[in-house]
Amino acid sequence: MEEAKGLCFMGERSLNMSVIILLFLFTVSLIGVIKSADIFVDRIVDIGRALGISQIILGVTVAAAGTSLPEFGSALISVLTGNPDLGVGVVIGSNIWNIAGIIGISAILSCAVTTNRDEIRRDGLFGLLSILILTFFMLMGPVGPLTGVVLLALYGVYLWVLIKKQRGYYTSHLMDHGEVDAKTIISAILGFTGLVVFCRILVYSAVGIAEIMNVPEMIIGLFALAIGTSLAELVVAVNSAMKHMCSLSLGTVLGSNIFNILIGIGIPSLFVKIPVEPLSLILDAPVLMGVTVAIMYFMWTDMELRRVEGVALVAFYLVYAVIRITLTR
């Protein structure tokens, strides 16, 4: 009897140690993903400028990919390593969090959430269209190559619209040519390598935590990974708001969400058929549609987000989180 108790105690101790190690790996890899993405994007911009690539192209692509690279990397690695629920959860969860969480908290802290009617029409409508198209294909079953082609084609149209719009803001489309030094190239390679490696560790630790704690991978993706990969933006918004220097562009947030869906789901689905979880179809997609419509309505009225509207967004997110976790159990 005493021996059995001893073995049980040792088992629990080993399990607790495994959880601590996985949480440590999760935290370190999350920081690594965010930092590697920053380094990679910055060096790609430097290389693009040196090669004389259009300032318009650089501005549009970097603005979109810069804030979404951690989510995209996590989603891609998750799907390709046989954890599609985790990948889909990151994309959808991050999009809901970006609007209801980051924008909502920013408004509560009196951060100026800025926009204009052109942004609402363009980014808002493309955002809604991307959600509708993804939902349509989800209704038909697993998301596969056809869906990926359609999503990527739509993103191509979105980029074309952005580039066309940006032409009016630049008097010169080409940057001055320069030289690409070895340090910049090595830094870009290291940033990309770090992104891949840390994303793999992040997914590994997230799956491990889900298995040990008996939590569905979709929940880990929807909340832990989604919030974690967007943590940098939240920290910046909170710190800036406390210094009364915060300004957050709605267009940037919506652009990031469009990238997450059209690229974050589009590219992985070209290689692997992604199964559709019923709750994603009947709850997650409608919630994402709802918060997108809500933020467009709030901002359209007077081009700013009031504190009470920020409270409503955060409250909505908390209610959604409780319902989602409860239904999953």
Image: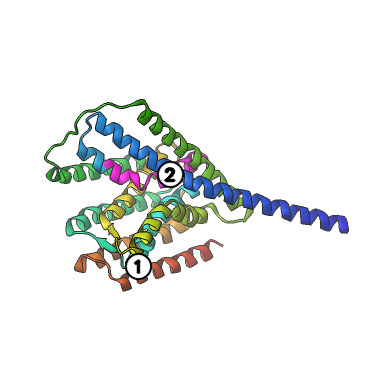
Instruction: Give x and y (percent) for residue 87.
Output: 46, 47
Instruction: Give x and y (percent) for residue 294.
Output: 30, 65
In the picture of the structure, the residue carrying the numbered disc 2 is: 35
Which residue ends up furthest to the front in the rendered image?
243
Q: Residues within 10 Å of mark 2 (few under 14, many from 20)?
A: some
On screen, residue 167 versus residue 71, left or right, reads left
Q: Residues within 10 Å of mark 1 (few under 14, many from 20)?
A: some
In the displayed structure, would residue 21 be above or below residue 235? above
On screen, residue 83 versus residue 312, left or right, reads right
Q: Nearer the viewer, residue 20 or 98?
A: 20
Amino acid under disc 1: Leu
In the picture of the structure, the residue carrying the numbered disc 1 is: 109
What range of the chain is rendered magenta? 61-82
Instruction: Give x and y (percent) for residue 84.
Output: 49, 46
Kindly check if marks 2 and 1 are in contact, taking CB atoms under 8 A apart as contact: no
The residues bearing labels 2 and 1 have C-alpha atoms spaced at a distance of 26 Å
The residue sitting at 77% across, 53% down in the picture is: 10
Tell me which colouring the rendered structure shows.
Answer: rainbow
Q: Secondary structure at mark 2?
A: helix
The residue sitting at 48% across, 52% down in the picture is: 225
Instruction: Give x and y (percent) for residue 204.
Output: 56, 44
Q: Nearer the viewer, residue 104 or 323?
A: 104
Quarter holding the C terminus? Answer: bottom right
